[in-house]
Amino acid sequence: MSERIRFEADRPVVLRGGTVLPMDDGRRILTGTDVLVIGDRIADVGPELPVPDGTAEIDATDGIVMPGMIDTHRHMWQTAMRGYGADWTLTQYFIWYYLEHGKLFRPEDVHAGNVLAAIEALDAGVTTVVDWSHGLQTVDHADAAVDALRSVPGRFVLAYGNLQRAPADWTAAPEFRDFVRRRITGDDMLGFQLAFDVTGDPSFPERPAFEVARDLGVAVTTHAGVWGATGDDGIRLMYDHGFMNAGTVYVHAASLSADSYHRIAATGGSISISTESEQSAGQGYPPTWAIRAHGIPVSLSMDTSVWWSGDLFSAMRTTLGADRSREHLEAHAKGDTVTHSGLRADQVVDWATRGGARALGRDGELGALEVGRKADIVLIKNEHSPVSFPLLNPYGHVAFQAQRGDVHTVLVNGRVVKHEHRLLGVDLAAAREKVERTVDHLRTTMGEEEWRKGMNPDIPQTTLLDNPYTYTDYHSDSTHTRRDSE
Ligand SMILES: [Zn+2]
């Protein structure tokens, strides 16, 4: 056991002798390499670096040093319900959150979920998370969400949403504008996006919300290509009205035609893939196999811990699996054999790091280990794990061998927030107590019977959900043809 290192503010840190994945264009692998951090920036990368007096030294030998991972779509408030919906479909999720119980969440419940999700992210080496926060029923909820994010030393983007009301309504509220003025100050640790979906309703009721986003100069993130909820009609409306641009993040983008992918590619937006979610909830087949051909930038996300964990190792692994699985299946259907994998391990590591930085318009600052960039860094190293050696193929190791228990050290903005597998400056007991109070509140308010039924939902006999958005009755035959024909 090494002596405990004291990490003080402004004390430089060097990670010594690791296998460094800088995530540059050449996808280089630098063995026996040091990474020096001074202040909030990467000051140097190279072998046996000279360092300032008093630099804290972290032994990275036998470990992998890579950029902090970036999750571009996570409903952090839902982490308070961790694992509850393990057997849900998307329909059951919509019913539970959108129609029945989402409104039970008080500001303190959003706070509790966000704090736990934020801590979980740091622990797993996810240094930036887009909090796709669509449970903000009031500005008090939004203040609680930001308070929570501010209380944990990670980098976050608040993607403001409110699934209980039409996007045109909540974005027009004066208290929303006031919130943006008060809380979104341009601080590098807290970005801002607008989060809402586009139903495809030809009257385009989401238009005023897009105008607010344009007015504020912020990006829109939208669940697009979700079977039974959003599809090509929404993309076409966004395109025709000039609201598709380089900052737009299309989440899932699973049930879309090639025409929609052309529009996304042509306007420079990116797609956030939540493979575990798409595989199990039913948005459509995880689409990387299809969108790779269109050259659309990709980032990865975990979606929600009500089903899955906030762990991008899982995201990389399942994304490789789903992509390769589909390639084999498509080839076999034609009597062909895939002899070379189209999607490589280094590509999913890129999507988990630099892909996220690109999606957030922060390539050049985040997502790579390069002199001058922000020091968001992960050391994967586990001396007690038989899986940590031999380290022959570092990208393959990250994607298929490593797991979050192997995250040894994490730096965010130059600050060491995890070391020797222990989070620093995080009050896990307080987070637990808050989440327990939220669970208590929900369970008591719902009643034991309803609580149990929610976790073990029946197969509905008659209720078929046309769309989960209560502000429009719109539904499209194009996404419901199978259901109609049954
Ligand atoms: Zn989502």
Image (tube, rainbow, N blue to C red):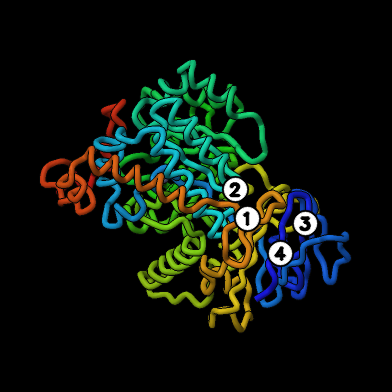
Label 2 CB-ligand 1 distance < 8 A:
no
User: Contact, CB < 8 Å: mark 3 with mark 2?
Assistant: no
Q: Which residue is mark 3?
A: 37
Q: Mark 1: few, some, or many residues within 10 Å (few <14, many ≥20)?
A: many
Residue 104 on image: x %, y %: 30, 34
Relative placement, left or right, of 138 versus 186 is: left
Q: Which residue is mark 1?
A: 417
Residue 430 on image: x %, y %: 46, 48
Distance from label 4 to label 2 (Cα)? 21 Å
> Residue placed at 57% from the left, 34% from the top?
192
Give the amino acid at mark 4: Ile
Distance from label 4 to label 1 (Cα)? 13 Å
User: Contact, CB < 8 Å: mark 4 with mark 3?
Assistant: no
User: Contact, CB < 8 Å: mark 2 with mark 1?
Assistant: yes
Q: Which residue is mark 4?
A: 5
- 481 in relation to 428, above or below: above
- 223 in relation to 126, above or below: above
Q: Secondary structure at mark 3?
A: strand
Q: Secondary structure at mark 4?
A: loop
Of all residues shown, which one is farthest toward the top? 174
- 167 in relation to 11, above or below: above
